[in-house]
Image (cartoon, coloured by chain):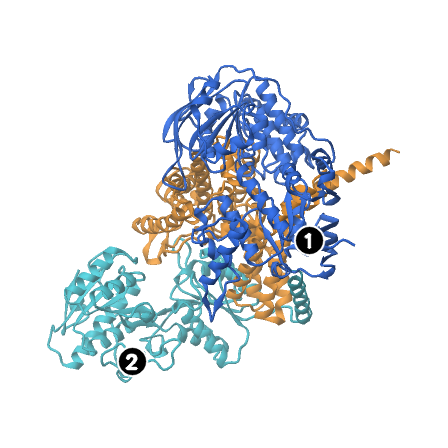
Amino acid sequence: MENYIIEMLHITKEFPGIIANDDITLQLKKGEIHALLGENGAGKSTLMSVLFGLHQAEKGDIKKNGEVVRVNNPKDANNLGIGMVHQHFKLVEIFTVLENIVLGVEPSKVGFLQKKEAREKVIQLSKKYGLHVDPDAIVEKISVGMQQRVEILKMLYRENDILIFDEPTAVLTPQEIDELMDIMRGFAKEGKSILFITHKLNEIMSVADRCTVLRKGKCIGTVEIKDTTKEELSRMMVGRDVNFVVEKLKERVGDVVLQVNNVTVPSKVSKKDAVKDISFEVRAGEIVCLAGIEGNGQSELISAITGLEKMSKGKVALCGKDITKAPIRVRTKAGISHIPEDRHKHGLVLDYSLEDNMVLQRYWQPEFHRAGFIKRQAVRSYADGLIKQYDVRSSQGALTITREMSGGNQQKAIIAREIDKDHKLLIAVQPTRGLDVGAIEFIHKQLVATRDAGKAVLLMSLELDEVMEVSDRILVMYEGEIVGELNPKEITVQELGLYMSGAKRNMEKEKSYAE
Amino acid sequence: MQNNQVSPKFKDKITGITKSKAISTFTAALLAIALGLIFGFIVMIVAKPENSWYGFTTMLFGGFRRLGDVFYYATPILMTGLSVGFAFKMGLFNIGASGQYTMGLFFALYAGFMWELPTGIHWIVCILAGMVGGMIWGFIPGICKALFNVNEVITSIMFNYIGMYLVDMWVQDNATIYISSKTRTAYLPASAQIPSLGVTNSNVNFSIIIAITLAVILYIVLNKTTFGYELRATGFNKHASKYAGMNDKRNTILTMLIAGAFAGLGGAFAILAPSTIAGSSMTYEPINVIAANGFNGIAVALLGSSNPIGIIFSAIFISHIQRGGTIVSSLFGYKPEIIDVVIAVIIYFSAFAMLMNSNIARMVRKRRLAKEESGSVNSNRKQNRKGA
Amino acid sequence: MKKIVALILALTLAGMMLTGCGTKNTTFQIALITDKGNIDDKSFNQGSWEGVVAFCEENDIKDYQYIKPEDASDTGYLAAIDNAVTAGAKVIVTPGFLFEVPVYEAQTKYPDVKFILLDGAPHTADYAYETKSNVASIMYAEEQSGYLAGYAAVKDGYTKLGFMGGMAVPAVVAFGYGYLQGAEAAAAELGLADGSVAVTYHYTGDFAETDTNKATAKTMYQEGTQVIFACGGSVGKSVMSAASEANGKVIGVDVDQRYDSETVITSATKGLGASVKTVLESIYKTDSWDTYAGKTTYFNASNAGVGLPTVVIGDDKADAFGRFNSFDKAAYDAVYATLADGSVSLVRTLTVADPNGIATADELTTGLNLKKIAITTR
């Protein structure tokens, strides 16, 4: 009999209409790092919510040290020693690090906060585990990596010994990811048990002892990492073989399509400029990737190019035509296609049908209306064509309300629309965010196909794998400036990470390559 | 054999219809109304238990005895309902329908008294004048919103007051229009009155036909034209419409202009209604009160889900309940004020339940669809979470 | 949520069962149609309704009701009358001149129903007057009411009076003449010297609340006028706001206007409630409907048809004469008696040269035989 610290046995959790968890069993040994792998929506978060007391399962038991326990709310979970680092941090932004850590379990004497005691404990913990934080810093002013460390310290402060990490690496630089892996190993060595939720196979391979794979709410199996491979895991996760390598021919670079000269964009949140005097160009037949950690001005730069925001200085030209001050419609007509960063905010009118969304960028074209009256038939057949060509799946075809579609299919619809539209430049902003492996594969193929068709592609991505795999040229942005122009074939992920974190900047050497 | 082939097809069709959006919105509206009625009934029981059941049924069905009046009183709130609902489709909250209504009313009055035109043309001109009045009063908040990004709620509330005081002032200053000894306007010339539909004891007139026609046209504009496509897109998602290069400013101004026109027409229809008494007419009293019909338009629009066709029905329904209510207050010994409360409870509970309901209906539909969508467990779970 | 729904359903069902066996219809024989305002408007609606209530309570009549029109228009009022008749009303009270046209229509339409039209006479939209035998048109002896107000003001020590009428229509003229005669009488009783009471007499030319009217009132106050009898609908509002700014006093009209402004010391009212009650009694008790039927009847002091307010609505203990300096109920009762017993008779109309009916100061002085009072017209 194995010694399991936490067991979730035959957990079934239904939401009206769907079964989010169907007879799932997950057993966590003391002192192990156990990965929970699955695509978006496979049921990982629901399962963890059940364990953390946010939801109650209809069927199944939770056992701690072999005894059945009830977890009705996060407080119960905490009493059982279960702690969780959420994907989106649950911190009070205007409080200090220390205040956040002690929040809810403040040591007090007759109502007075005993800060000194708490501070000592926090400092001691952070030294012990190498979790460097400044206890007096205000949370909103510290880096994402440090915020995560605060979350971890919160768990430790509460003396939890079962630690759940929900997609912890999504927001970190490669260096920070490595650090986090070390910290996790340290915890395991100490006898703490770790549940590590992710869909990134590399991380699992490097840190986990065992891995449980979920797919569509069902438990596919639990494997020992040392006995398995990345390919095997991905097959379990997706249900078929996945090609990780983006196959592409060597680029055939043509004329300059997008010319950006000395563009400066003011920031919306602070008085500083979000984009500082940036110049670059994108040529036909190449994929240029804007890399960088979130919030270093990439979004603002893209918005300036697409016309969503105004720039304060500089010029943007498309195929030699100045579009600096052009309205969005003019840019669209001039040949810019734009896969927006936030598909719900910008990319789709969620309450519109799929067909109406398919013509969002071209309903005004003569083929889709007669004297202002929309030609429904033309729209329908056009949408049907795209749906077929790009395999956009939905329950009612062209008439499905897009809000009811899955994220992957929503994104496919946008990509179909933007690629099919007559364009010279495709701007794709985080086109694979939040999508599963299958969808990512599809989108990468489309980007490469667009480039091979002789269009210019400007890709903005936060995913390092994507940056390295898809692009022909990388522009690294740090604090509103381009700090490096890199060739993905010549650099390592670690090196890229150094540029992204601002530790290294070398434009001149790399620039020679581009010329 | 053939039968076997036909029936599944037919079944598909039936299920297709029941699943369509219109049907579930309609169901939602019925549910909302049912809820409103229950609460209304409870108020009646509390107020006067012994008569409540007959009173309540009379309230529900009494309107059928006075169909002419049901349509007559439905006309202005149908117009203000369209005004509010149309702007709402674009994501604008036109709370200024009252001001536009009053402005339309004055313009119509002015044209009625001051311009001498042949019978048969005069009333049409008066209606158009009313429309222009409303348009002007919608246009200004529209401009403020589009060019200076001033919230339309604030401007249109202010314009309710400005419009009302201006009109009251203009009316009182005009000796032809105003009879100060009676503190109200004089009787409009017959040529300025909208032709009656000839229902005995009712003022119901041609304007209800115009109003319904306009609602249908509005429905077509919203759903069949590129302009409507842009408006609804903007209403659903401002950011996406900007992303798609739609001219937000132009559309905002146009929307407020049209919304104002509708409310203005409502005012014109109200004041130009014919009278069953020879030589008499509707009159306006400049007593510094903001027109209630403008605010009732909000309830009408809510209950009609801002859908022009829905608004036709909700306006008629509200008018129907009010007419029934009048009968109740005279026949069943309820104080008129209690009946006012009951009507308000029914209308507003229905309207608010409608708001809730359409969300619930959307969720139910989503879940049902979820089962059908292949490999859609994922997306649904996400949506459920969003819904919760 | 489910529980709440279930509870509501249960309640509703219970309610249906409790109420299902109730009466089917209530009819009523006396109905009052309210005008544009509410039943508690402290004005025509409320005044007349109190008469209906008082009569019905005294005579143990249970089936009376007021009806609120759906629409403040002639047809809206007529429809309300229709409703009342449908509900079985035999007597319908219509407070105010706004009902003149609707009652004209209704008197033909419902010959078996009796109408009591207060402060108005039935006519067509084109002002063709006709009062049928099922209508009692009730008017009020405004000159008596004005007399009481003028008397009270001078008795109370005011010597600089003002009058702001709307237009020179009969009711307003009568109020004004009565006011002057009352002031004269009080001055004579007090033994004041000739010409020692100054009255500024003014017709505004409208019945509206305007800045001009307010400015006029304010000027009058600044010139020394202590109290203005505001006699012209919404003119009163202008005068009241001028009074509160210039620290003057106001005498209200038609109904007790003390509730509109602190500046109102008293009001020359019409005895709405009393007149309604009297006419109802003629129908139900004394069988003398013919006294009022088919014509216009003026109510006066002898049948409580006019007066100054003697009670404060909603406050039994308050003194309705509390805003006077010294004039009190006893003094009021004394002067009222002289009107009621007919020992004082008043001039209601004068023949004047002006086509609009606006009398000059001389015409007033001679016509009303004024000695103590010096009149200035504006």
Are dots 2 and 1 in contact, CB under 8 Å? Answer: no
As displayed, is residue A273 above or below residue B284?
above
Which residue is located at x 55 percent, y 31 percent? A493
User: Along the horizontal axis of the image, is A97 left or right of C166?
Assistant: right
Q: Colour of chain C?
A: cyan
Q: Are marks 2 and 1 on the same chain?
A: no
Color used for chain A? blue
**Kind of element beneath mark 1:** loop
Instruction: Please identify the quarter of the rendering in which residue C334 is found.
Output: bottom left
**What chain letter is assigned to the residue under label 2?**
C
**Is A329 situated left or right of A407 in this image?**
left
**Residue reaching furthest right?**
B1
Amino acid type at mark 2? Tyr
Where is mark 2, residue-wise?
A: C336
Image check: C172 left or right of B8? left
Horizontal relation, residue C235 to residue B232: left or right:
left
Of tags 2 and 1, which is closer to the observer?
A: 1
Q: Residue at x 47, y 79 (%)?
A: C286
Q: Separation of disc 2 and disc 1 at Cα?
A: 104 Å
User: Which residue matches tag 1?
Assistant: A30
Q: How many marks?
A: 2
Of A89 and B84, nearer the camera is A89
- Out of B359 and A434, give the one closest to the viewer: A434
The hue used for chain B is orange
Residue B55 visible to an observer of this rendering: yes
> Please, what is the three-letter code of the amino acid marked with disc 1?
Lys
Q: Chain of mark 1?
A: A
